[in-house]
Amino acid sequence: MRVLFWVQHLLGIGHARRASLIAEALAAAGAEVAVAQGGHPVASARFRGAEVVQLPPLRSADAAFSALVDGEGRPAGEALWAERTARLAALARRVRPEIVLLETFPFGRRAFRVELAPLLEGLAAAPDRPLVAASLRDILVRHDAKKDAWILRHAQRWCDLVLVHGDPRLLPLEASFPPAAELAERIRYTGYVVPLRTADAAPGADGTDEVVVSVGGGAVGAGVLQAAVAARPLSRQAGAARWRLLLGPDLPEPDRTALMAAAHPGLLVEPARPDFPDLLTRCRLSVSQAGYNTVMDVVGAGCRAVLVPFARGQETEQTDRAALLAARGHVHVTAEAGLTPERLAAAVDAALAGPPPPPLDLATDGAAATARILLEAAGRRRGVSDTPASGL
């Protein structure tokens, strides 16, 4: 089964990491996977078993998502869009996909309709029309009614399936996308996409009884790390513990240099680690933002946690996820706006003084389930390429 997977991250690295696990699961299930990578390469997203075709990369110009820029920071112009569109079309002609998987679009990434609309309209008109599916995280950024209507209209036009990488027992899609009920026949919940843990480490291994502070890719996490440096001596519960700060690959270099200079025996500062989920299983407390991947690592580890959700611009996703888990007693939350060392230290103390988080029973085999759902649906389509989208 031939799969074309369009992947585009703009600021953080969470989308690329989740997409990598899904692509690897599809390849492990026997599919031939070609990934159209639209953002800059992410070292932790390896897409093992898949072919990765790099489009001219685009990213957000800033944390407010005010504009798209290329790898050199120049505004995206007509020539760049034309090149991306042509490369994507050429890849589709070569792959001849039976499945097209779209990371977030059309539920987000609306600017990329420039390159995706011609592709999808062309595929829809082909006699061997492929199955088209959207790949969504559990919570979408909230939009106004006009944008929701645009999303619904284009999802109905282009998408045979809407794969939600979450668990409706925790949060149904309609909580962040009210028109979801009109797509009910197309929606499939896959469970959360979570990486496999490595083997248990020996007693005393890194992370044991530590406060682990992380910010994902780090593009918008400098404030959390800086507050943590000053919060450690202010904490009554963890001031004597070792704090380990993990610097994401996209942390601006001046911030990286300053944080490395602040390190001392009780404050370790190092690059983000691939064994981050394992550190959490041994830590005293996690301090992090509230992105999809990090939160699932925290929930999977069952550790105490303080979340500082990214909430600049129009971003609502991390705030919603953090509030949901806080209401169930799984995490403590402190707002990003006006974050101070004193407030972060108080949140750390409250989390450590309270009860441990209760167990949270969630489906976490989302990558394998995604592969199974897609391959079974596409298998049913073979020989019936004229089946309407609404018939699935």
Image: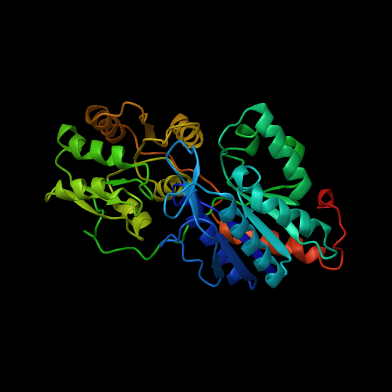
Residue 307 in the figure: left or right of residue 57 = left
Residue 69 in the figure: left or right of residue 377 = left
Q: Is residue 349 something that shows in the picture?
A: yes
Residue 235 in the figure: left or right of residue 21 = left
Give the percent coordinates (x, y) of residue 264: 12, 49
Q: Is residue 296 above or below residue 278?
A: above
In the depicted view, which residue is nearer to us: 249 or 174?
A: 249
Tell me the quarter of the image containing the N terminus: bottom right
- The residue at 55%/61% (across/down) is 55
The quadrant holding residue 221 is: top left
Looking at the image, which residue sits at the far left? 265
Give the percent coordinates (x, y) of residue 311: 43, 32
Q: Is residue 123 above or below residue 109?
A: below
Question: How was the colour assigned to the protein in this rendering?
Answer: rainbow
- The residue at 46%/58% (across/down) is 40
Q: Is residue 179 above or below residue 164?
A: above
Give the percent coordinates (x, y) of residue 170: 56, 39
In the depicted view, which residue is nearer to us: 256 or 194?
A: 256
- State the count of labels: 0
- The residue at 21%/58% (across/down) is 204
Give the percent coordinates (x, y) of residue 249: 34, 55
In the depicted view, which residue is nearer to us: 137 or 192?
A: 137
Q: Is residue 1 something that shows in the picture?
A: no
